[in-house]
Image (cartoon, coloured by chain):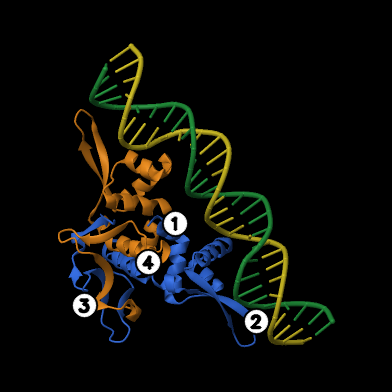
Chain colours: A orange, B blue, C green, D yellow
Amino acid sequence: MALAAEILGDRWTLLILREAFYGVCRYDDMREDLKAPRSTLTDRLNSLVARGVLEKQPYQEAGDRVRQAYVLTEAGRGLALTFLALAQWGEAHVTGGAAPVGVVDRESGAPLRVGLMDADGAPVDPARAALRLRG
Amino acid sequence: MALAAEILGDRWTLLILREAFYGVCRYDDMREDLKAPRSTLTDRLNSLVARGVLEKQPYQEAGDRVRQAYVLTEAGRGLALTFLALAQWGEAHVTGGAAPVGVVDRESGAPLRVGLMDADGAPVDPARAALRLRG
DNA sequence: CTACCTGAGTTCAAAATTTAGACTCAGATT
DNA sequence: AATCTGAGTCTAAATTTTGAACTCAGGTAG
């Protein structure tokens, strides 16, 4: 997990990824949302690309030159569970239940949550979890 | 989630919390494990206490004066799911499957994982998740 | 009593990072 | 030819982090 911490252990990186999950993928849009300094934003985007969490995708708007969009890679999308768990925690313990967004099933609209499960998908109380070294 | 990002958006904070989950709770033990500078460690521990993620607990070893241990609060333990999700991601996408630890059921020893579930606890594919604003 | 040890800090100057703001550059538009 | 825009780079100043040295309180050894 040390490497994961190295990737995520930064305020701007976390916020940039949240933007990415919301679908914001252009430099200037992120800059405006986050009010991050240009050089820091450039730096963080580059490291996320270097780490394989984001990738640059060329796009072109009518009557404009080709530009780059930053979109989540497969690995980046894999962070969804982590972010959902974090949002769930923030809601429960930090913001006091007033979180502005929740997770729902894309089709049915039913509320979803992150939880622990066993190999068969049956829910398990997180208090039962223990870390175990692997041979 | 912005507040949560403010709390976790820091390399040392993430690593300190990992130590706390492993049960390390003494200043000098953490300092040695993490090789963090004293002043930074002190600062991060204090903010985690101020945020209500850790708390100081007095303890006393035979023939020694009372000292403080840093242990997870209820809210801090609530971060377990986030950390497990992060560890799971690191294992799948960063370290390439060679993660040293896994999560198991404390009693049965069966392997566990973090996942998305609906209100009834039935597993849901994370790709089906969507963020939804709440009224 | 005096000297020394240890855990848990605090202090401080040097090094690294972050910031705001100005500047650049390439192609499109007027 | 002049201007606009997205996406940067450059730079000097402000802030944060670092490592090393110092402090402090209580306990122990001689």
Q: Residue furthest front?
A: B135
- Are circles 1 and 3 on residues that touch, CB within 8 Å? no
Report the residue at 60% width, 78% height from top. B67
- Mark 3 or mark 4, whichever is nearer to me: 4
Determine the CA span between mark 3 and mark 2: 47 Å
Name the amino acid, label 1.
Answer: Glu
Quarter occupied by the C terminus of chain A = bottom left
Quarter occupied by the N terminus of chain A = bottom left
- Residue A122's mark? 3
Q: Are marks 1 and 4 on the same chain?
A: no
Q: How many other residues sit within 10 Å of disc 2, few (<14), some (14-19) or many (≥20)?
A: few
A35 vs B78: above or below: above
Name the amino acid, label 3.
Answer: Ala
- Mark 3 or mark 2, whichever is nearer to me: 3
Relative placement, left or right, of B133 versus B60 is left
Q: Secondary structure at mark 1?
A: helix
Determine the CA span between mark 1 and mark 2: 35 Å
Q: Secondary structure at mark 3?
A: loop
Q: Are marks 4 and 2 on the same chain?
A: no
Q: Which residue is mark 4?
A: A92
Residue B122, how many percent across, how many down? 19, 73
Determine the CA span between mark 1 and mark 4: 16 Å
Name the amino acid, label 4.
Answer: Ala
First along the sequence among labels 3 and 4: 4
Q: Which residue is mark 1?
A: B6
Report the residue at 19% width, 60% height from top. A109
Q: Tell me which corner region of the image, top left, top right, bottom left or bottom right, holds residue D18.
A: bottom right
Residue B66, how many percent across, how many down? 62, 80
Residue C30, how many percent across, how many down? 26, 17
